[in-house]
Amino acid sequence: MTFQTMKTAATDKGGTHMSGGKRRDDLLCVWTHMFGLLTALLMIGAVGCGEHTTEATQPIQQGTEIHLSDGVLQGDVDGGARRFLGIPFAAPPVGDLRWRPPQPPLPWEGVRPADTFGSACPQRYYDDQGTPVLDGDEDCLYLNVWTPDPAPTRPLPVMVWFHGGGNQMLSASVQIPFVGGLEFDGRALAETRNVVVVTINYRLGVLGFFGHAALAAEDPHYPYAGNQGLLDQRAALIWVRDNIIAFGGDRDNVTILGESAGSYDVCLHVVSPGSGGLFHRAISESNGCTTHQASPADAAPATAQLVESVGCSASSDVLDCLRQVPVADLLNADPLKDAGGAFNVTIDGGFLPDQPRALFAAGKFNKVPYLLGSNADEGTGIFLDPNLPPITTDEEYLTALSWFYGDLAEQIADVYPVANFASPLHALARAVGDGGNVCLTYDTARRAATGGADVYLYNFARPLPIPGLEFFGATHQTEILYVFGSFDFVTEADRQVALGMQGYWTRMAYSGDPNGEGAVVWPRYGDASDERINFDAQISVLANFRRTECEFWWGVYDQEFK
């Protein structure tokens, strides 16, 4: 589990702006160091592809040897599921393909073992001693498939997972910290809920969201720059469309889902015209995309700074020069490498033709059934920050709010008075969590529903189930253990919540409606009724959950567009 804290709460990459770039960078720095401690534990343990299509005429294949048009795979059996790891869905984005849209995968001879995860994409994080670590390999565009054993007799729904990590770090193969075990393990869902699960890697940071203007001139079929990681995700969906029938999956019933940055990316596919038809339902856990997104002009200074710092600004062919730069040098040249990363999603004109908020308002989005939600204690990851000064008094609370949010501090203190919380630190954690995740997800749900989508909204309230860490409450990313069933829960209450959530999520994948099987009825979201389901020891329905707090944050988001 990554416990991604509220990095997005202060950036234009899916969260709340603060007044003043210095404050924004300082907050990102705090979150990056805090996140790095846990990331170290994790690490220890699409246009180009559009031309590579095949007809889904092949039958469902039995056993663990799967014949694809690119070659033969040998997987293995894991309990009641067949598992295929490290399948290439695009050519390695190396050499001249660095920063290009993903290209078709390279065929292979013989039988390819599919029992090992592909490398994580290049990334920079901090180990538990606070030392920066460079990890990953550019040859990283691989996916993993879990499907029932024995093979189904009819095509099953497919659930494609986008991992989190701020679009800067992590991979499909991260481990649960402190206790071990694969976090995004598709076995339980395939084995007990009869779905096909796919998890993927995608390019990150400077290699996955680099929008140098010269890139737009390289390919007349795709005259845009940046958002390579999003195109990788789309390429994986194209691979699913063309190949998943062999594993027993239904190419016409694909759900995309993700958490944190992965949730944000799901939202971006919902509004991206080019992703239409590649998925049929969507699930966003702890993030939306309806705050102000960066423009190419916003990203240009960081791009120029990186080009200068690696010695390519005077080159007659800047891109050729940049493609000769070692990966480590690129990662270290990121101007915000210690503050969340300078390179992320932009409104490129291609993948994203406009601000997501505008596309929802105009009804110009993929109107698939959409399930969204967040956790009750999204912001408690700040408890881990070793650089956060003591916050034990009202004065220290206001100082911290000023550091996090600048001129908004007093207004936020009025919305989150210390008297309503166990301590000033808990008040700060609630404000950070609401502003960065809870209310942003809520805002996207409102806009998707108003635009015509069937929307289902949730709150997750179970405390982190790892013994000794329950004080975090229902912190960021806790729900993933329940959705995947990838954790050995101690209490029967947690086991039942996990089974309940897996039922809702997979019913959503089957039909676009999470209801059924005698479960508590999950009302469709509407702004007037404002109801959502609440996942706790007793599953229930809430109305107007944190409406007052979120109306404040919605006003803050609105200011970004003025």
Image: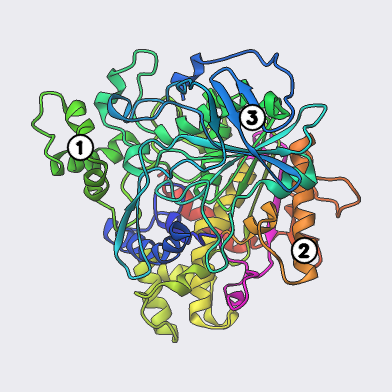
Circle 1: residue type: Val
Q: Relative to 182, is 39 on the left or the right?
A: left
Does residue 538 appear in this view? yes
- Count residues near mark 1 (Cα–Cα under 10 Å), then give few for <14, some for 14-19, many for 20+: few
The type of residue carrying mark 2 is Arg
Q: Classify mark 3: helix, strand or loop.
A: loop
Q: Which residues are magenta?
A: 448-476
Looking at the picture, how far across and down is residue 180, in whole percent? 56, 63
Q: Is residue 193 magenta?
A: no
**Residue occupying image coordinates x 48% and y 48%:** 558
Q: Residue 410: horizontal and vertical position, in percent?
A: 43, 71
The residue pinned by badge 1 equals 325
Nearer the N terminus, badge 1 or badge 3? Answer: 3
Question: Disc 3 marks which amino acid?
Answer: Phe
Q: Which mark is residue 279?
A: 3
The mark found on residue 495 in the picture is 2
- Alpha carbon distance from label 3 to label 2: 30 Å
Verify CB contact (< 8 Å) between mark 1 and mark 3.
no
Q: Of helix, strand and loop, which one carries label 2?
A: helix
Can you give x and y, in whole percent of width and height, for residue 464 in the image?
62, 69
The C terminus appears in which quarter of the rendering?
top left
Q: Residue furthest right?
A: 518
In the rendered view, tell whether residue 540 sits above or below residue 286.
below
| Picture residue at 55% right of the left edge, 60% below the top | 1
Quarter occupied by residue 215: top left
Name the residue furthest left. 314
**Outermost front residue:** 110
